[in-house]
Image: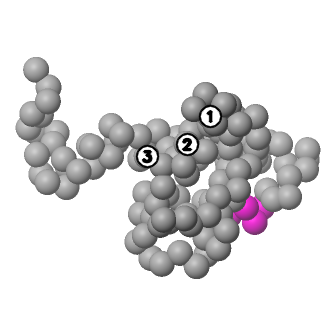
Amino acid sequence: EWRYRQLYTQHRFASTQKKGGWDALRHAEILAAGAIPLFENLRNAPPFTIPFLPVVKLLKAEAELWPYTPELERQYNETVQALQKHTWQCLTSESMAAHVLQTLGVWPAYRPLKT
């Protein structure tokens, strides 16, 4: 697992695709490692199949930053920072649990796991 994560941290981009479905933990792992996922056929993903991924930002990143050249470094870094911010706010286990509890209307007013 360490080698798997290390692979993403050493590269600017990571190729990925729909496998069992569009939504996969692999995509959050790529983003958390600081790489930009390049999806095969992301434009063809049906609406609402990957609701927590920033699809528009990912498509924009691919269009503007791929293929990468050193002149794109500042824009690349800004894009990665924005994608990582989204990852921490929306794709972590904690943020997903908070979303479920908010949807159920039991959080933040009622915190069953907090002592």
In the rendering, at what x and y percent does residue 14 appear? 71, 50
Residue 47, visible in the rendered structure = yes
Tell me the quadrant of the picture where the C terminus can be found. top left
Q: Residue at x 48, y 49 (%)?
A: 25
Q: CA distance from mark 2 to mark 3?
A: 9 Å
Residue 88 relative to residue 71: left or right: left
Query: Which residue was labeled with disc 2?
Result: 29
**Residue density around tag 3, few if under 14, some if 14–19, many if 20 or more, within 10 Å:** many
**Residue density around tag 2, few if under 14, some if 14–19, many if 20 or more, within 10 Å:** some
**Magenta segment, which residues?**
60-64
Q: Earlier in the sequence, mark 1 or mark 2?
A: 1
Q: CA distance from mark 1 to mark 2?
A: 7 Å
In the rendering, at what x and y percent does residue 88 appear? 46, 39
Q: Indicate the amino acid at tag 1.
A: Arg
**Residue 14 part of the magenta-drawn span:** no
Q: Indicate the amino acid at tag 2.
A: Glu
- Dot 2 lies on which element? helix
Contact? badges 1 and 2 (CB < 8 Å) = yes
Residue with the most extreme top position: 115
Query: Which residue was labeled with disc 1?
Result: 5
